[in-house]
Amino acid sequence: MAHRSLGLAFAVALLFPAFGCQFDSQKLEQRSCQSADTCEEGFVCCHGYCVLRVTCSDGGAADFTVDQGPDTTNPALDKDGDGILDADDNCPDVSNTSQQDADKDKVGDLCDCAPTDETFSKTLLKVSDFDDAALFTAVESGSNWSIVTQGSQGLLRQGSADGLQRSKATTATMTSYLATATLLFRQSGNDGLSIPTDNISMAGILVRGGKLAEGTGDGYYCGVDLANWRIAIGRTSGSDLADGTLNLVADPFSDPGKSISQGVQINQPYKIEFRVVGDQLNCEVVLADNSRITTSATDSTLTSGEMALFTVGAAADYETVTICGNE
């Protein structure tokens, strides 16, 4: 039997001379392999076959010749390496094996700008730390918008507490918006407006803006009012700003705005979410305890436009800004 075993090993070696490998004739049923860890101890995967380490001329480092099916690690097929081919992946650039899609819009939650709102999925602007001043351009000549760094956190700071100050984002004109921003007040000031008659100290998001220039411009405003402890929606159009007017749009279920019973504090973060689709305006604030206060309005005065940040009668810092749009 010993002679027959040697003969078989010799014959196999002749069949695969280019591989530089020699089979162990005692375990021929275990020869096929796809990686080194599929071979038993003392053996290596040499060109797709388990062989004794000393009989493989390249130590098993050569490419395998066994057909392993589709190469899911190929960036052209599976860029994020989550095992799901790009053609079937609802989030091909971010690994998401679960493929979770809460709003069923066929865009995975991990790469969906608004994972619970099927109207929006595309991220138009996402600034988690501000390192490019060109993303926001000051509108008023007296605006004092700047990028500052506090620790590792970048901030977009508006330093003037008086008057109306706006900073336009570099986004295209749109009809529908879901814009969010996290802000905190540093100081209250004088709004310089004749209407509303009560002074407001407000900071927030402007959408559907147009003709934005010093002392003029259209837009819908969603913001937190430090002076009056509320969240409110406003609008300017035509000669409003020249006349010193910011129209607070009435919530159909209350006075303009909604009261924040906990109060509004200096140096406390507030997350603002402004959703505008058609004539429906929805302005929401997320408080420090994660509770939400929402005010809504119906208005069709402005149908499309740009996005901006604004303060009126207040100095504020913006820590994060995200703008979601339609695909």
Image: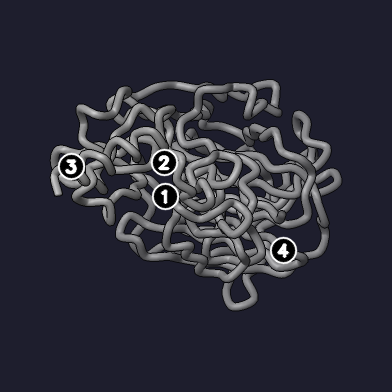
Q: Residue visible at 62% across and 60% down?
A: 275
Residue 292: x %, y % from top left: 42, 65
Earlier-in-chain disc, 3 versus 2: 3
Residue lying at the far bottom of the rendered structure: 253
Amino acid, disc 2: Leu
> 274 or 73: which is nearer to us?
73
Residue 309 as seen in the image, left or right of residue 29 = right
Instruction: Report whether residue 67 is seen.
Output: yes
Q: Residue visible at 67% across and 26% down?
A: 137
Q: How far apart are marks 1 and 4 (CA)?
A: 23 Å
Q: Residue visible at 28% across and 28% down?
A: 56
Q: Name the residue under label 1.
A: 270
Earlier-in-chain disc, 1 versus 4: 1
Which mark is nearer the camera, 1 or 4? Answer: 4
Q: Distance between the residues labelled 3 and 4?
A: 85 Å
Q: Is mark 1 on a helix, strand or loop?
A: strand
Assign the C terminus to one quadrant of the image.
bottom right
Q: Distance between the residues labelled 2 and 4?
A: 27 Å
Q: Do the residues labelled 2 and 1 touch (CB within 8 Å)?
A: yes
Residue 122: x %, y % from top left: 64, 51
- The disc at residue 3 is 3
Residue 150 higher or lower than 198, as above or below: above
Amino acid, disc 4: Val
Q: Is mark 2 on a helix, strand or loop?
A: strand
Q: Mark 4 points at which residue?
A: 277
